Amino acid sequence: MPAAPRFTTEQDPADWCATIAILFLALLWWRLGIPSQIYFDEVHYVTAARHYNEGTRFNPEHPLLAKSILAAAIRWLGDEPLYWRVPSALAGAIGLFALGRLVWFVTGKRLVTLAAMFLVASNFLWFVISRIAMLDMIMVLFGMIALWLAASAVRLPHQGRWRLALAGVAMGLALGAKWSIAPLLLVPGLVFLVCKLRDHGWRGLYRRTGGAVPGITLAEAGLWLGLVPLAVYWLTYWQGFFWAKNPIDPFDPLGWHAYMLQLQDSVTRPHPYRSVWYEWIGNWRAIWFLYQDVDGAYRGILLIGNPFTMLAGLAALGWCLWAGFRHGRSDALVFAGFYALSLLFWALSGKPVQFYYHYLLPAAFLMVCLALALDALWRRRDRWRWLAPATLLASLAVFIHFYPILSAGPLCCGRPSFEYWMWLRSWR
């Protein structure tokens, strides 16, 4: 049997990726059951999970999978705050590992991979959203697995068929958790089509050779990356087909989705924490998930991006675009494109009320752009090289500084304590 082709001379850091993910999970687990009550959007999703365990409909405006996983955790482990949040915590840690694998298979660079995971873990958003019973982190978990498997199919074409097939399954599961991932799920299929046309022109529509994964025809790719995700996605509604009251009609997917869209567009009442995409870019508008006297102390959970890396990431995004178009760095263009695509979804979305947590995916890809720029800086071996490790240390230092108000830690001075972390008036 021929040896697997190598796409990089560097050693795969899979063991270090797993180590970082395990350490991140341990950090998530600390005080995961605090607050010992429902907070922020848990009121929607924990309630929905309880209804699902009773076989009744609730919160039909979102897909069912993430809420069904939450319902399973409550059913198997218990109806307590710690157990509500276990699915998000596990998804956050495994999703971070999957992100690292995606970065590795796109870049082939150890330093970029490990730095990207470190920056995402210390960027606040991934951490905070991994500690609350919401839909987003479960969506991100399956989305990152899908992109990882699709990228690895390109790098390991001798394993391309089963990797594309599993990528299609993961795509359907991601979409079944939340729709926000949809634009990114189009990328693998579009890349496959473009590569076939690049290598064979219009004959690439039926040629087996060439393309992103040699040996796979466009029709077969359409099966794995198109039909399989759609079939898996609709199967994630299985529980809803058997609700005791007002079940979903399994033979009317279009009608059900029209109903879901109608419900989502009906939420138009202004919310004090609403924001828009250009405010997310500047890290301008925070959300207070929690700030009250609970569990024996004043505690807060603030959702905002790491003030240092969010701004440094914008500079790195500019570098990625420059390196990509000027020097042909395809890896830089991939992650800059992921950032732009996931942000453009919200910029063009007709959803009338949006929140900062919708920046979760763009922010993660922004941190990968920063890791790419730091790797380039480190490899220059000039007097500015020190900025690469200094940036990682600064990211960690700012995370540690904000940690009490990211993790529901007890605040020492009562109600006014939050002012210590309010660097901008708009964060209040």
Image (spheres, rainbow, N blue to C red):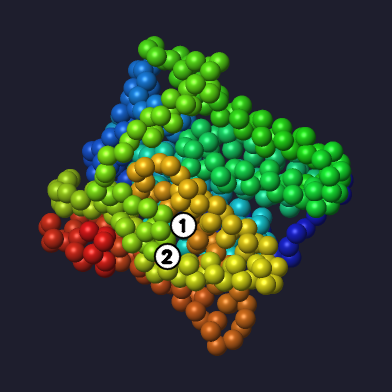
Q: Looking at the picture, tell me which residue is in the foreground, 157 or 343.
A: 343
Q: Secondary structure at mark 1?
A: helix
Q: Which residue is mark 2?
A: 310
Q: Residue at x 59, y 68 (%)?
A: 320
Q: Looking at the picture, tell me which residue is in the foreground, 224 or 296.
A: 224
Give the amino acid type for the residue marked by disc 2 in the picture: Met
Q: Is residue 96 above or below residue 311?
A: above
Q: Residue at x 13, y 56 (%)?
A: 415
Mark 2 Cα within 10 Å, few/some/many (few <14, many 20+)?
many
**Cβ–Cβ under 8 Å for marks 2 and 1:** yes
Which badge, 2 or 1, is on the more N-terminal residue? 2
Q: Which residue is mark 1?
A: 363
In-image side of 1 versus 139 (left or right): right
Q: Residue at x 34, y 33 (%)?
A: 266
Mark 1 Cα within 10 Å, few/some/many (few <14, many 20+)?
many
Q: Is residue 202 above or below residue 368?
A: above
Q: Residue at x 48, y 67 (%)?
A: 313
Q: Residue extending furthest top?
A: 244
How far is mark 2 from mark 1, CA to CA? 8 Å
Give the amino acid type for the residue marked by disc 1 in the picture: Ala
